[in-house]
Every structure is written in C-alpha cells, then in structure tokens.
Amino acid sequence: MSDLNRANVTRFVYEQLRNRSFRSKLKVTSSEGATPIVVALPSDPTSTLLSELDAVGGAANVVLPVGDGVLIFGMHQADGDDTEDIPTLTERCTVGVFLARVVSDGGRGRYKFRGLGSDHESGRAELLGLAS
C-alpha cells in the first residue's frame, strides 16, 4: 500500500473481505462470534491502538499497511495477568515499532506498556498473515 491514508487502508480491507484467503487470516473473534477488525497506521501511538481494542471488547484483528499489502496481527488485551517478566514499552512507542518488535520476537509475544493510563496495558499479539 503506497498510500498510508487510513481511509485507503480501510477501503482495501473492505475490498479484501470478499477474498476467502484474506478472511481466513482473520482469526480473532469476539465472544459474540463477530470478527473485529482495527485498521492501524505505523505512525499511530500505541495508546490509540489500545483504545480501539477497548472499543471492540479487548480483542481484534489489527490490519497494518506494509509495502504493497497489509500485515494482520491478532491482539488480545489481558486483565492483570502476570506480566513481570515481559519487557515494558513506553507510551511513546508507535504501532509500527510495537509490531516490528512482535515480528522480531518470532511473530508472537506478550506486551506491556507503561504510562498509557489504560486498564489494559498488557496482553498478547500474534502475526496472523500478510495480504496483498
């Protein structure tokens, strides 16, 4: 995706929803059976991403534009699990840096943020796929 405009990325996602291969990568579902999707840009602050996760119930398929397509990550917020052994990221961390960290950790990992003022500053993220 050459244009990192949120509206264009959202339009791309809507178009891809007709594609069975794309839909198969959306593995996160809500307790009601819905498949929440959050579009994020690499420059977005992680506080924005966590607010979006709060708004959809704490778990979502996060779609991030890269190159000519999008990366899809599954994210699940945690409610106070043991996060003492998890490296802490600061509130200045962007979504791009955070998800690069997940990729460098083998495509899945737990996360913890400091200073965001959210009840859900920790959780887990997993790379689900690439779509173009």
Image: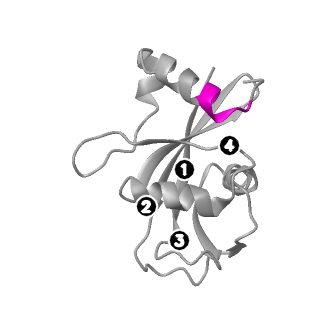
- At x 64% / y 60%, what residue is drawn? 46
Tag in front: 3 or 2: 2
Q: Position of residue 89 (x, y in %)?
A: 70, 71
Query: In this orientation, which residue lies closer to the viewer: 39 or 73?
Result: 39
Q: Secondary structure at mark 3?
A: strand
Whole-Å distance between the Cαs marked 4 and 3?
A: 20 Å
Mark 3 and mark 2: span between their CA atoms? Answer: 12 Å
Marks 4 and 3, the one that precedes in the sequence: 4
Question: Disc 4 and disc 2: Cα gap in Å?
Answer: 17 Å
Q: Which residue is mark 4?
A: 41
Tell me the SS state at disc 2: helix
- Provide the secondary structure element on which disc 1 rests: strand
Q: Nearer the viewer, residue 41 or 103?
A: 41
The residue where tag 1 is placed is: 126
Gap between marks 2 and 1, in whole Å?
Answer: 18 Å
Q: Earlier in the sequence, mark 3 or mark 2?
A: 2
Disc nearest the viewer among 1 and 4? 4
Within 10 angstroms of label 2, few (less than 14), some, or many (20 or more) residues?
A: some
> How far across and down, in percent of the image, does residue 118 sit?
52, 74
**Where's the N terminus, which quadrant?**
top right
Q: Residue at x 53, y 71 (%)?
A: 122
The secondary structure type at the circle numbered 4 is loop
Q: Position of residue 102 (x, y in %)?
A: 66, 54
Q: Which residue is drawn at the image coordinates 44% and 48% (left, top)?
A: 60
In the picture, the disc for residue 122 is: 3
- Start and end of the magenta stretch? 4-9
Discs 2, 1 touching: Cβ within 8 Å: no
Amino acid type, residue under disc 1 in the picture: Glu
